[in-house]
Amino acid sequence: MYKQAISTAEEKMDKTKEVFKRDMQSLRAGRANPQLLDRISVDYYGTMTPLNQMANISAPEPRVLVISPWDAKAIPLIEKALQMSDLGMNPANDGKIIRLIIPELNAERRKELSKKVGQAAEDSKVAIRSIRRDAMEQFKKMKKDSSLSEDDQRKAEEELQKVTDAATKEIDALAAEKEKEILAI
């Protein structure tokens, strides 16, 4: 009976970890990475369209991203979307492609990004603990309804704690890896 609640909580924790991973991929670390532009959407004929669905994005050099739109008329729209984004980079176009030169990170910006990673990790861990709390409430309700014995409740809580600890540990590992990448010169 309680296994269902644990597997539901585990699925939610997995989704939280995936969101954190995606956020970390789109965080700039001084190297050109096409996933940096995953969050960018372009107002294309009145519809917000993800940039990666309207152009080929590549990193031919370590600090350059090249965006090759499939529709040349979209270049000004893509440029506008890039300028409006929180990337802080100016696009340069030659009429066919857009180049984004990724500036070298200074020490202050590295520390700032490192703090951002830490904050995002903490937010993800708070979400995971919230999922755990909801499942614990479910166990208490099951015990109150007499559909779960006290021993089963304790066992369920222990299993849930193991799942929570594993998810938290994975978030910490991903955050440490990203911080290391950011602080590396």
Image (cartoon, helix red, strand yellow):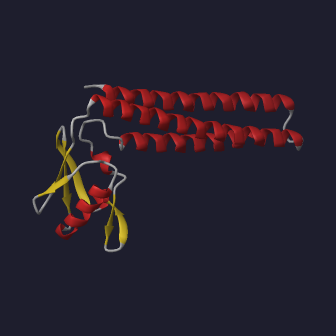
Residue found 68% across the figure and 39% down from its top: 6
Residue beneath the point at 21% across and 35% down: 104
Residue 73, image x and y in percent? 19, 70
Whether residue 1 is visible here, answered yes or no, is no
Q: Is residue 73 above or below residue 66?
A: below
Location of residue 113 by image quarter? top left
* Residue 61 quadrant: top left
| Residue 75, x across and y down, in percent | 20, 64
> Taking 122 as reference, is 51 above or below it?
below
Q: Is residue 43 above or below residue 156?
A: below
Residue 88 located left or right of residue 127: left
Question: As rendered, which of 114 and 108 lies closer to the eye?
Answer: 108
Give the residue drawn at x 30%, y 36%: 29
In the current view of this chain or complex, which residue is farthest to the bottom? 45
**Quadrant containing the C terminus in the rendered view:** top left
Quadrant (top left/top right/bottom left/bottom right) for the N terminus: top right
| Residue 164: x %, y % from top left | 62, 32
Whether residue 157 is visible: yes
* Residue 14 quadrant: top right
Residue 179 position in % (x across, y down)? 38, 29
Query: On the picture, is 157 further left or further right than 85?
Result: right
